[in-house]
Image (cartoon, helix red, strand yellow):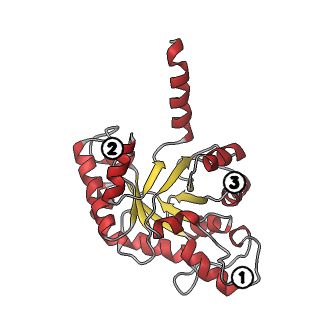
Amino acid sequence: MNSERPLIINRAKQKLKAGEPIFGVNIFEALTPSIVKIAANAGSDMLMVDAEHAINDDGRLALFLTLVRDNGMAPVVTVIAPERALVSRVLDAGAMGIILSHSETPEQMKDLVRWVKYAPEGERGLAMGANAGYDSSDIASYCRDANDATLILPKIESPLGVENAGAMMDVEGIDGVVFGPGDLSAKMGHPGQWEHPEVLAAINSVVDAAIDRGLAVEPPVMPSDRAEYNRELIRGARIFGATRQTEYDLYRDALNRVLATNR
């Protein structure tokens, strides 16, 4: 292995470390080459595969993760618990980051870091498969590079998560924050009202806390035009794109636009 060039390169995390924005796409079921190629052609940095609401065949998921990596993007998987059986397996299959849905406590974050990072930062088990590009020539360098390259993002989607956001972000190894405004709005008594003033106030408090800590974060509402994007960028938000949508939403919106003139 060339020690001057890391074996594991996560361009999304590199951009975040440099203070640059990244653009993500959230995928539920459409684990296909076409989705990867279209996302890459559009300039996406990160493909987020949801393993909370969608069920995908393990082999198909593993192939998809490798394909995403081979097209210069970071595959990041959303899991439902900070457990070894959920975290380490998808990382060994090729994921370059983990999003923990319904993140609520710093203890969860410590467990998540424990299973994401190799020793001494964590306790992840060693395998030199898809995660290492099947290269076992320099295991020590691989472990160091993988620890540095892997993204760890809590997903805030409850009042308790908002309350404990600061403590969670203070756990060593956390790279940023994303949001689940659908669940958050429902738990705050405003189901479906993602932009209710109380919901936005809660999200804004977490955004401010993340920016103060120099962590990557989504804006409270994804920008609808360039002016809004520039304002959020100046504020300090760094994670943008279709991270709160699914391929269902994107296909539905596109199809409705195409058919609108015929109705």
**From the viewer's perspective, is residue 103 above or below residue 29?**
below
Along the polypeptide, which appears first: circle 3 or circle 1? Answer: 1
Give the Cα separation between the discs numbered 3 and 1: 27 Å
Tell me what residue is drawn at x 68 percent, y 56 percent.
71
**From the viewer's perspective, is residue 252 above or below residue 125?**
above
**Between 127 and 73, the one nearer to me in the picture:** 73
Q: Nearer the viewer, mark 2 or mark 1?
A: 1
From the top left corner, tell me how far across and down residue 193 is, in percent: 31, 38
From the top left corner, tell me how far across and down residue 70 is, in percent: 70, 59
Where, quadrant-wise, is the N terminus in this rendering? bottom right
List the residue tagged with mark 1: 2
From the top left corner, tell me how far across and down residue 89 is, in percent: 64, 67
Tell me what residue is drawn at x 46 percent, y 69 percent.
18
Along the polypeptide, which appears first: circle 2 or circle 3? Answer: 3
Helix, strand or loop status at disc 2 = helix
Q: Nearer the viewer, mark 3 or mark 1?
A: 1
Look at label 2 and name its amino acid: Ala
Circles 2 and 1 in contact, beta carbons < 8 Å: no
From the top left corner, tell me how far across and down residue 206 is, in percent: 30, 60
Give the Cα separation between the discs numbered 2 and 1: 50 Å
List the residue tagged with mark 2: 186
Helix, strand or loop status at disc 3 = helix
Crowd around label 3: few <14 · some 14–19 · many ≥20 (10 Å): many
Q: Is residue 82 visible?
A: no
Circles 2 and 3 in contact, beta carbons < 8 Å: no
Look at label 3 and name its amino acid: Phe
Residue 64: image tag: 3
Helix, strand or loop status at disc 1 = loop
